[in-house]
């Protein structure tokens, strides 16, 4: 079953270890880049979310507030 997990000091290395096929690399940011943007956008209440299938991390997402109306998120 898929679940969303807040990335923290205990599980960030699981996100860091993610990789995609070489043909997909130009479409996606690296896990390190996503983690870094989560830190850089902390003033916008950014959160890095791990996507897990059971206990295995299979993806990641960055969610942050936007200063626009109506209220929305950048995913």
Image (cartoon, rainbow, N blue to C red):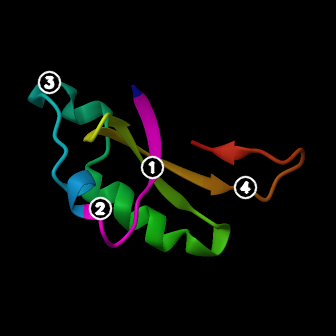
Task: Describe the element under mark 2 as helix, strand or loop.
Answer: loop
Measure how far apart labels 2 and 1 are at the Cα level: 9 Å
Where does label 4 land, which residue? 66
Q: Earlier in the sequence, mark 4 or mark 2?
A: 2
Q: Earlier in the sequence, mark 1 or mark 4?
A: 1
Measure how far apart labels 1 and 4 are at the Cα level: 21 Å
Residue shown at 22%/54% (left/top)?
Answer: 14
Residue 70 lies in quadrant: top right
Q: Nearer the viewer, mark 3 or mark 2?
A: 2
Residue 11 has which mark?
2
| Residue 67 locus on image (x, y percent) | 79, 59
Q: Earlier in the sequence, mark 1 or mark 3?
A: 1
Mark 2 touches mark 1? (CB < 8 Å): yes
Judging depth in this view, the residue of 48 and 25 nearest the camera is 48
Q: Is residue 20 left or right of residue 35?
A: left
Crowding at dot 3, Cα within 10 Å, few <14 / some 14-19 / many 20+, comes out as few
Task: Describe the element under mark 3 as helix, strand or loop.
Answer: helix
Residue 23 has which mark?
3
Measure how far apart labels 4 and 2 are at the Cα level: 26 Å
Q: Is residue 72 above or below residue 14?
A: above
Stretch in magenta: 2-12
Give yes or no for residue 24 being in the magenta stretch: no
| Residue 72 locus on image (x, y percent) | 77, 44
Residue 35 lies in quadrant: bottom left
Q: Earlier in the sequence, mark 2 or mark 1?
A: 1
Q: Residue furthest right?
A: 70
Residue shown at 26%/59% (left/top)?
Answer: 32
Residue shown at 21%/61% (left/top)?
Answer: 13
Where does label 1 land, which residue? 5
């Amino acid at each position: 079953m898929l679940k969303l997990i807040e990335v923290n000091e205990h599980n960030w290395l699981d996100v860091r270890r993610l990789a995609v096929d070489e043909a997909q690399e130009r479409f996606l940011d690296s896990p390190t880049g996503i983690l870094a943007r989560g830190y850089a956008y902390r003033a916008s209440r950014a959160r890095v979310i791990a996507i897990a299938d059971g206990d295995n991390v299979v993806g990641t997402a960055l969610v942050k507030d936007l200063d626009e109306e109506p209220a929305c998120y950048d995913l």
